[in-house]
Image: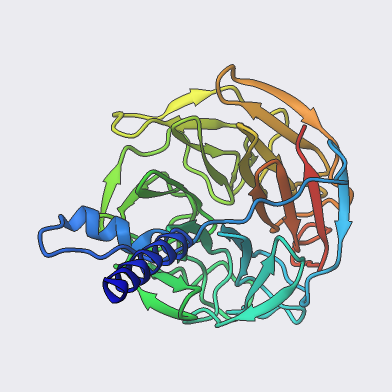
Amino acid sequence: MAVAGLIAGVAVLVYLVGSVFGGQGAHPAIGAGTSPRAQAAAVRRPAASTALSLKGIPVGQWVSLPQSPVWRSEVSAARVGDAAYVVGGFDINGRTTGLVERLDLRTGRWTTSRSLPEPLNHVSAVGYGGSLYVVGGYSQPGDTSTGSVRGFWRFSPATGSWTAMPDAPLARAAAGAAVLGHRLYVAGGRSDTQTTISTLAIFDFDTNTWSLGPPLHHAREHLAGVAAGGSVWMLGGRALGQGNFADVERYRPGASAWERMPAMPIARSSFQAVAANGRIITVGGEGATTFAEVDQLDPGTGRWTRLADLPTPRHGLGLVADGPLVFAIDGGPAPGLTGSRVVQRLRVP
């Protein structure tokens, strides 16, 4: 009886340990009868994020953080778990780079991840299911706005490896991209043959396939994409000979067309937008100069309000959000091919 009790106790202990650590990113067993959708969801389940302490972080103020390791511009950034990944762009010599750097948002520590499968600038990076995804971009060595690609790749932080995904329906760079639910939405941009694009391409992570959705009302490139309030939003951008746009369009999944929404307070291009505290935050951009203005949109009311100015105005920057914190990373302090190592953080009110 004593031996049987000991065995039972060990079995219970093993079960409890498995339950505790399984909740921190381990995947449950997937039986043969599990549906393909459930299998895919189980494999994609990311490790739990650690809540970032807000103690001592002032509200409504930008704070300068330690600089990034490498001078860059025209990057893209995405949050995956507790980290921000800064991808591609131009280096200090004006050459296209495949560099990928990781900023631990809890410790502030920078590390270098495996480079992109090829050097690219003006890419679109997003986080989904514990992985980093990168689509499109320009592949030419310098700032030529040519060499657009259809490539789509997945980076696994767990294995440190890149995997080729199905190519996008069309080649483009400087597009807007956002993940909503189990789908990636990519709109706008430009290619070697089109100076502005209105096409919406949708990637379904469950079926691993691309499809096309309704086009934007207004074709543009160097726009920003964000998911908020159950919709996908595309903001701003520009067109050759027409300057910057303040246009905002919203797409509700399954709708037959985009909705025109209240325009931004200023026309922007080469900027970024993120969702934080239930608001859409727009940061950076360029025109005759770079923009310090930071604005937020309430998706429910359509009302824009002004936030604290970005201390170092930049374009071609990376932008990520972690709860109420917004991180502006790298980018050019002057129009054209300029860059920096500047990292600044705002706690959204």
**Residue at horizontal 65 percent and vertical 43 percent from the top:** 323
Residue 125 left/right relative to 99: left
How far from the left and from the top, in percent, is residue 208? Answer: 25, 60
Labels in figure, total: 0
Residue 30 or 236: which is nearer the viewer?
A: 30
Residue 15 or 216: which is nearer the viewer?
A: 15
How far from the left and from the top, in percent, is residue 3? Answer: 30, 76
How far from the left and from the top, in percent, is residue 250? Answer: 46, 31
How far from the left and from the top, in percent, is residue 158? Answer: 48, 75
Q: Is residue 171 visible?
A: yes
Q: Is residue 113 above or below residue 193?
A: below
Residue 302 or 279: which is nearer the viewer?
A: 279
Residue 164 or 54: which is nearer the viewer?
A: 54
**Residue at horizontal 56 percent and vertical 25 percent from the top:** 299
**Please, which residue is most extreme toward the front here?**
1
Quadrant in the rendering for residue 10: bottom left
Q: Is residue 207 visible?
A: no
Q: Is residue 156 above or below residue 309?
A: below
**Image quadrant where one finds the N terminus:** bottom left
**Image quadrant where one finds the C terminus:** top right
Residue 31 left/right relative to 142: left
Q: Is residue 110 above or below residue 307?
A: below
**Please, which residue is most extreme toward the left here?**
33
**Residue at horizontal 41 percent and vertical 61 percent from the top:** 16
**Residue at horizontal 83 percent and vertical 51 percent from the top:** 313
**Please, which residue is most extreme toward the top here?**
301
Chosen colour scheme: rainbow
Residue 225 left/right relative to 211: right
